[in-house]
Image: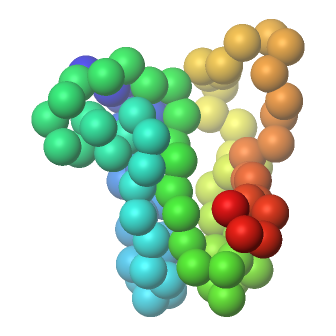
Amino acid sequence: MMHPAVTEAFEMAASLLRKNRIRFRAIGGIALNLAGAGRPTKDVDLVVARRNWHRARGVLQGLATQVQGIRLGLADEPESLFGRCPPGQ
């Protein structure tokens, strides 16, 4: 079962990406939960095509910078909400 804040974050991100016609896939714990595996997760991992990276970042940046009043991560985790795989990975 996912924390309600994680579910809300996923639904908001997915809605924004769909509205902007940016194809994506959920990966990691969120994908397992969507498939019914019920693995605990504290974040939303999404993949977009490299050619859509900048568009997706622009679309999601406003969502990512909204203060939700709850921090699900650990104190020593980075605050960055976006990541990028190096070429070839």
Taking 29 as reference, is 67 left or right? right
The residue sitting at the front extreme is: 88
Q: Is residue 50 visible?
A: yes
Residue drawn at x 37%, y 19% is 40
Residue 20 lies, in percent from the top left, at 50, 86
Taking 21 as reference, is 76 left or right? right
Which corner quadrant holds the N terminus? top left
Up/down of 50 relative to 32, above or below: below
The quadrant where residue 56 appears? bottom right
Up/down of 47 relative to 19, above or below: above
Residue drawn at x 45%, y 40% is 28
The residue sitting at the left extreme is: 36
Residue 89 lies, in percent from the top left, at 68, 62
Residue 35 lies, in percent from the top left, at 18, 43
Up/down of 42 relative to 53, above or below: above
- Nearer the observer, 89 or 33: 89
Residue drawn at x 53%, y 63% is 47
Looking at the image, what colour scheme do you see?
A: rainbow
Residue drawn at x 43%, y 49% is 27
- Count the marks: 0
Q: Is residue 12 visible?
A: no
Taking 56 as reference, is 65 left or right? right
The quadrant where residue 39 appears? top left
- Nearer the observer, 53 or 89: 89
